[in-house]
Image (cartoon, grey):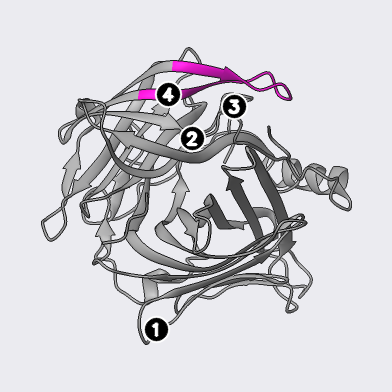
Amino acid sequence: MCSTHGLVTSDRPLPGRRRVLGLLAALAGGAWRPASALPPRTLAFPHDHGSHPDLRTEWWYVTGHAQAAQGGRRFGFQITFFRSRVDAAQGLRSAFAARQLVFAHAAVTDLQGRRLLHDQRIARAGFGIAQAGEADTDVRLRDWSLVRNAADGSYRAEAPGEGFALSLRFAPTQPVLLQGDAGLSRKGPEAAQASHYYSQPQLEAAGRIVIEGQGRFEVRGCAWLDHEWSEALMHPEAVGWDWIGMNLDNGAALTAFRLRRAAGSALWAGGSWRAAGEATRTFSAEEVRFEPMRTWTSPRSSARYPVQWTVDTPAGRFAVQALLDDQELDSRGSTGAIYWEGLSDLLDAQGRRVGSGYLEMTGYAARLRL
């Protein structure tokens, strides 16, 4: 178990941003097409910690919170690597063909400074620039990396960004949590909308966060890792999702999500609950309900995000409260999306804080396309 008790964004233009966005649009095509359902299978580790290049979309997502050893300054952090198969390039023989693209995001929420710092990367896999290893977690993009140590199961993340840097180690304290039906997680009303998905909650986080102009902070905290891969995640009616991954102070782990239509109604929902040392309880689509309580409007995208929620689950009713309203990320230089993702507290039905984690909201500025 692990627990700890004004915005500036790094949105500098990336080299060739228009060219990159044009390439992504051409490769993605923007149109939904039906796909076959993923076959149920037993996830096998460490192999399934690695990349699955035969499927279209994959990500390794680490979020968490940490406090500085001196002064108690509190931070949220996020580092994510995405792999995307480029269908149009699969049949090309050239070594220069962009068969796989690798993206990465990293962000720091500085609660004392009331700001979010964010950076991003994109490159095609190969030539020593970017890779997503298949044998175990080993994803790299230039000088950014997330690598798993097979000896002890820990992860090392390095992300020197614009205005900040992350150098963190994540040590597991609990077994892998298989989401959905033994790791096969439905994401819509049709069987094709599904992913292979597992989480590693309650990771002990330790390392260094650097905020340029303010110093280097040795930190300790708690993190959550999601690894998910799929062929067709989004139903054509879905515009985005709302998701929480929460580490509770008593060692429990709560996941809840919903896929959302344009009018705001839930198309699909799900999640899980695992108390420390107990079996996982998987939620059905009918058992999870998100109710927005307070919204914040971005001055940049004009998107309105619910930054406070009531979330009903079989494990109880909870409140989710953003610790900083403005945690909107502009990733148009890599994935092409503007979305909200940030450090939030979890409160029980009596209003008592019981944990912390991350809230993610996509599809509010524009329809999310995967």
**Relative side of 80 to 248, left or right:** right
Three-letter code, disc 2: Leu
**Relative side of 147 to 92, left or right:** left
Three-letter code, disc 3: Arg
- Closer to viewer: mark 1 or mark 2: 2
Task: Characterize the local packing of mark 4: few (<14), some (14-19) or many (20 or more) Cα atoms within 10 angstroms.
Answer: many
| Separation of residues labelled 2 and 4 (CA atoms) | 10 Å
Q: Earlier in the sequence, mark 4 or mark 3?
A: 4
Q: Residue at x 31, y 31 (%)?
A: 269
Part of the protein shown in magenta:
294-309
Q: Mark 3 highlights which residue?
A: 367
Q: Mark 4 highlights which residue?
A: 308
- Write down the quadrant of residue 220 in the picture: bottom left
- Write down the quadrant of residue 336 in the picture: top right
Q: Earlier in the sequence, mark 1 or mark 2?
A: 1
Q: Is residue 63 visible?
A: no
- Secondary structure of residue under mark 2: loop
Q: Residue at x 41, y 30 (%)?
A: 321
Q: Residue at x 75, y 58 (%)?
A: 212
**Is residue 194 located in the magenta-colored stretch of the structure?**
no
- Closer to viewer: mark 3 or mark 2: 2
Three-letter code, disc 1: Ala
